[in-house]
């Protein structure tokens, strides 16, 4: 597709796994995380509009429009149906993909995400103030603390796409803030695994139970001490759980 940058890794004949990153991030969110999945799956990523090498198209963006983009990406790479693993805002996009394009999703993994809307448990004002810190170094330090425990010492790909324009960043914020899948969640009819960190202040852990109760048959697993980036910090165990679930 000329307007969406797509990346594919893994054997062409392997079952497909679509990986969806968080808000204001490109496919690089998955660098270092996708390789274990690519051993078993044909892993597919794309750069959201306004990130990476994808065009910043006009018109309103939403988790539903990003889900439409995801379905178009599957068409482009010749995949009818894929397992989908979405994290943070990517989990919100994954919800809409399963709701609006049910035939395209065979299994669903939702990590550190929320159903959106008035029933979601939103981050506190203290977190909002940290994320609005005008000093870039202080804001990065705050974001690292929200993503990882003090024991973390690695390099992170989860801190935002530095190539984004200010306008694209604002539009991404509106995409995530405008999400509300509550009414559609009971229509999700594929095996679903909901993952969350117990100490997530970006998307409070109570949202995992909301999703688990709302999606028929969903399983919920909580990583003790995990923060918003728990799936990265504890990747060895979390990715293994995802692989076991997908079978």
Image (cartoon, helix red, strand yellow):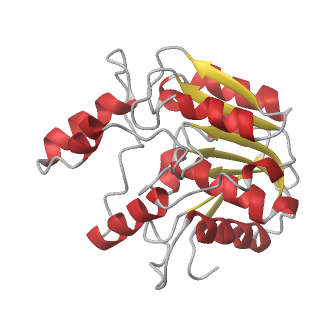
Query: Image quadrant for the C terminus?
Result: top right
**Nearer the observer, 218 or 193:** 218
**Nearer the observer, 12 or 245:** 245
Kindly give the residue lying farthest to the front in the view shown: 118
Residue drawn 34% across the image and 22% down it: 153
- Residue 73 visible in the picture: yes
Kindly give the residue lying farthest to the left in the view shown: 135
Q: Is residue 86 left or right of residue 31?
A: right
Kindly give the residue lying farthest to the bottom in the view shown: 58
Query: Image quadrant for the N terminus?
Result: bottom right
Residue 3 image position (x, y, % from top left): 56, 80
Residue 62 image position (x, y, % from top left): 54, 68
Residue drawn 53% across the image and 22% down it: 234
Q: Is residue 72 left or right of residue 33?
A: right
**Is residue 234 positioned above or below 143 on the image?**
above
- Residue 10 visible in the picture: no
Q: Is residue 10 left or right of residue 191?
A: left
Residue 52 image position (x, y, % from top left): 44, 65
Residue drawn 83% across the image and 39% down it: 216
The mark tally for this picture is: 0
Residue 128 image position (x, y, % from top left): 28, 44
Q: Is residue 174 left or right of residue 95?
A: left
Location of residue 147 by image quarter: top left
**Nearer the observer, 77 or 139:** 139
**Is residue 241 positioned above or below 156 on the image?**
above
Residue drawn 53% across the image and 38% down it: 32
């Amino acid at each position: 597709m000329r307007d969406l940058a797509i990346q594919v890794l893994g054997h062409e004949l392997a079952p497909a796994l679509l990986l969806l990153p968080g808000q204001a991030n490109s496919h690089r969110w998955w660098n270092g995380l996708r390789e274990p999945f690519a051993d078993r799956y044909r892993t597919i990523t794309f750069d959201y509009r306004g990130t990476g090498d994808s065009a910043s198209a006009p018109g309103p963006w939403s988790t539903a429009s990003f889900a439409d983009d995801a379905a178009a990406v599957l068409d482009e790479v010749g995949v009818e149906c894929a397992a989908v693993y979405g994290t943070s805002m990517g989990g919100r996009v994954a919800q809409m993909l399963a709701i609006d394009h049910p035939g395209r999703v065979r299994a669903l993994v939702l990590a550190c995400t929320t159903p959106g809307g008035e029933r979601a448990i939103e981050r506190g004002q203290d977190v909002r103030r940290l994320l609005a810190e005008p000093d870039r170094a202080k804001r990065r330090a705050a974001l690292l603390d929200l993503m990882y425990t003090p024991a973390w010492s690695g390099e992170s790909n989860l801190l935002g796409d530095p190539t984004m324009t200010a306008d694209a960043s604002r539009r991404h914020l509106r995409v995530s803030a405008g999400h509300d899948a509550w009414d559609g969640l009971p229509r999700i009819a594929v095996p679903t695994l909901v993952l969350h960190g117990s100490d997530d202040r970006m998307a409070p852990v109570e949202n995992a139970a909301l999703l688990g109760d709302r999606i028929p048959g969903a399983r919920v697993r909580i990583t003790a001490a995990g923060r918003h980036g728990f799936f990265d910090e504890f990747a060895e165990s979390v990715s293994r759980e995802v692989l076991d679930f997908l079978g």
